[in-house]
Amino acid sequence: MIRAIFFLSFLLIAGLTLSAQDCHCTDEFQFLIQYMEKNYAGFKDKGTGENRFVYDSVTADIVTLAAAVNKPGFCAALMKEWLGFFKDGHNYITAIPANATGPTSGNAATADPVEIIRLTPQTLAQLRSRRKGMEGIYHTSDSTYTIAIVQSKTAERDYAGVIVTSKAPTWRRGQIKLELRRFDATHFLACGYLRDHSIDPEIFHFDGVSFGDGIWIRDGTPAHKAIRSRSPALQQQWQTIQARRLSDKTYYIGIGTFDESNTWPVDSLFHADSAILASVPDLILDLRGNGGGSDFVYSPLRAWLYTGPVTVAGVDVLATDDNIRGWAALLDAKDIPEENKATILRIIAQMQGRRGQMVAIDDGDTVTRPEVRAFPQKIVVLIDEDCASSTEQFLLEAMQSRKVTLMGQHTAGVLDYANVRDVALPCLPFMLHYATTRSRRVDIGKGIDNVGIQPDVLLGADKDWVEEARGYLEK
């Protein structure tokens, strides 16, 4: 340890630390365990039978760790580690922001002082020379932040990550951006804070030169992991829709999300561009970064891709009182069309009649349409590992079209257990999000979780994917 001379002071800036001293991680964790065992649609597959011994062992280990933790961020990090046992990207924990309103607002984080550690120039110079151990100077892969990791032992943490430089105006030199608590030789509970000072709990692995899967890299060390980066245009596309002509033959459409909020924009685009789509030979549909949303959002695309009957696997929902409440909450969502709310009401009625059972949302079907549209004649769909959930459902349908070629990288593989609902933890300022449905693909060995959908044409990160797609179509 470097025997640093530093001064502590406090600023009243919105952060997230323990705001309810009566909260106990053990109690919150027991709630999480019981809730997931009762309501998660994948628990029977993953936590029982031959998996039960491993599940019980993992659970016992983390329960023991939880008993020694008081800080909400560290508790949430342990919860995320436990949820990781299920290997399901639809199970996750998020913080309830301080300005939350509605039913969860009682659990929202309150403003807490942000601790400041003022490091001397001599201490920083010593830290820059460190090449072994956890202490040292680290930067993010995009160079937005540089922090000093110093041993700063309290009842809750072992190390603190102190801002040295920041390109984000919400962070200033000396503020603690990261707190670490060691729980074995190379793993740490991490309580990080985002740009708005909201919490970002994680489990970090330290490999000697970086931690957080390459998020933080020791100064003077080459980035030894491939850190994926995106162009500003593609970053923007995540939340927008783009459409433009690339040539006389090829039209481009990029859709960054199938979130319910994008229902009207997607529908409007395909109506406005219907004359172009009805005459253009080639279409590039760019879905990179599209993490999903709701199936009804991509409905306007289906007719343009169709070349023959499309088979859709059946889906069942786990009917419990908690899941019924979760589905009923959808009826208040303003972005869900009324016809879809009628379907939700039907599903809720079925669930109420068969509590404790798996209830069919959809028995599976082969969908036919009255016509095959002449144009577009060929379609490339660009995909990557951020394509998930409802986007993967769309791709399973799209790849049955003779017009469609998938290009890029494999998708996330987060679909077999879906239709996420959420619940606030009893005391701590976090929400649990979990899957309530199970695809019948699992029963026939065609699940895609943790595997993803593979592209027909693989593209490397060094390529301009749009130009590669255009060249492929126009050759």
Image (spheres, grey):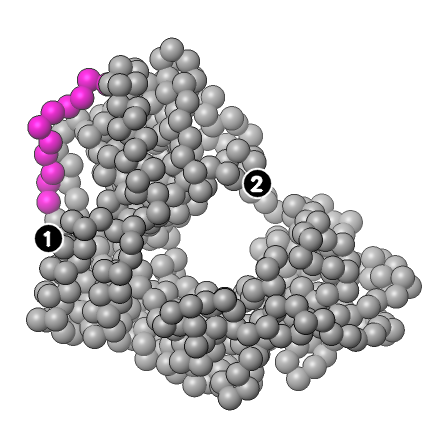
Whether the magenta-drawn stretch holds residue 376 is answered as yes
Give residue 445's position: percent from left, percent from top.
Answer: 22, 52
Which residue in the rendered view is the most extreme toward the right?
122
What residue is pinned by disc 2?
229
Element assignment for label 2: loop
Magenta range is: 365-377
What residue is pinned by disc 1?
363
Residue at 84% of width from left, 73% of height from top?
6
Residue at 59% of width from left, 43% of height from top?
226
Front-most of residues 352 and 211: 352
Front-most of residues 147 and 115: 115
Give residue 139's position: percent from left, percent from top.
Answer: 71, 53
Residue 24 higher or lower than 110, as above or below: below
Instruction: Evaluate whether residue 239 shows in this view.
Output: yes
For badge 2, the amino acid type reads Ser
Give residue 452's position: percent from left, percent from top.
Answer: 35, 46
Residue 190 higher or lower than 282, as above or below: below
The numbered mark, 2 or 1, whose residue comes first in the sequence reads 2
* Quadrant assignment, res 59: bottom left
164 left or right, relative to 204: right
Residue 110 higher or lower than 369, as above or below: below
Q: Residues within 10 Å of mark 1 (few under 14, many from 20)?
A: few
Q: Quadrant of the C terminus?
A: top left
Whether the magenta-drawn stretch holds residue 196 is answered as no
199 left or right, relative to 128: left
Give residue 146's position: percent from left, percent from top.
Answer: 73, 55
Residue 120 higher or lower than 169, as above or below: below
Residue at 38% of width from left, 11% of height from top?
248
